[in-house]
Image (cartoon, rainbow, N blue to C red):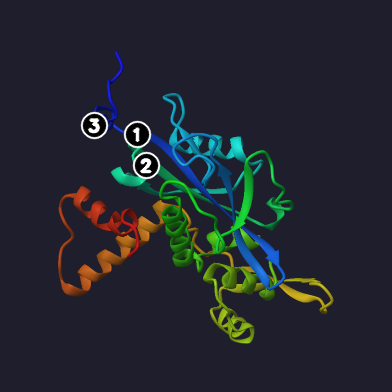
Amino acid sequence: MGIGNVTERRLQPPQVGVTVVILALAPSPSGSRLWLPLVRRVRQPFLGRWALPGGGLRADQSLEQSAYLALADTTDLHPRYLEQLYTFGDPARSQGGLPMVSIAYWALVGREETADFAVERNVRWFPADALPELAFDHRNIIAYALRRLRTRIDEPAVVTRLVGETFTLNQLHDVYEAVAGEHIDLANFRRRMLATGRLEETGEQRREGRHRPAAVYRYAPGEPDTASPYGLVQRRLASLNRSRERRGEQPPADRDVLMREAMSPLERPAA
């Protein structure tokens, strides 16, 4: 038997689904920009507005499988990197519709995977810094994904998913500038990156436009892959243990308490 009115329906457990922010790097007249695909809604609520790709959950699929299925339904992209971002469940996010909880993921795709930003059906690509009016709280979800990317851009396993395994310093600079959303002095950037000792020359050269061929670099072997949330938690655990040792403290006997402490910065949105 169905629930008789809207108020009673809103008191029922919320629907749960997945939402995906796909961030891609593409050239523009002023350098490179981050782009993402949006889907025009064909039903209420928010009929006609643009929204992030998403879908419901099935009992025979994992969350990751559901996220990949949502991508397959809207784009032909198969990102090499997909990570759970955050769970959004504010009761007001549906603005009067049925309550919904969205488990958000973010994906990164590189230049070679986005050769064509053609419009297909109700899907269109938009620059991340020039978004249309969005449905639900999807502008907040996108902003959260961009903050996550900006805090992780120094990690080789993240930046190479946008620029590729090998790159020139100009190409690497374009990625950092697109992610930061502001101008970064090229000469200072080159000096800073080379001074880190994290890059090594491949011995190859790559021509960029009409400029003379430039040296091709890659990240030095042994750089840790911290792109997964598990890698981040391990680093956080190690940092907490070092801090306790300096203070002469013992770690909590309950490992669950220690894990919650290590994961807490990853589980809450940035201010």
The quarter of the image holding the N terminus is: top left
User: Could you tell me the amino acid type at mark 2?
Assistant: Ser
Residue 94, disc: 2
Q: Which residue is mark 3?
A: 11
Q: Position of residue 88 (x, y in %)?
A: 35, 47
SS assignment at label 3: loop
Q: Position of residue 119 (x, y in %)?
A: 69, 46
Bin the neighbour count of mark 2 within 10 Å (Cα to Cα): few under 14, some 14-19, many 20 and up.
Answer: some
User: Could you tell me the amino acid type at mark 3?
Assistant: Leu
In-front residue for pair 13/180: 13
Residue 267 visible? The answer is: yes
Q: Which residue is mark 1?
A: 98
In-front residue for pair 6/237: 6
In-front residue for pair 265/180: 180
Bin the neighbour count of mark 3 within 10 Å (Cα to Cα): few under 14, some 14-19, many 20 and up.
Answer: few
Q: CA distance from mark 2 to mark 1?
A: 7 Å
Q: Earlier in the sequence, mark 3 or mark 1?
A: 3
Q: Position of residue 186 (x, y in %)?
A: 63, 82
Q: Are marks 2 and 3 in contact (CB under 8 Å)?
A: no
Instruction: Indicate left or right for 20 with 103 as reference.
Output: right
Q: Are marks 2 and 1 in contact (CB under 8 Å)?
A: yes
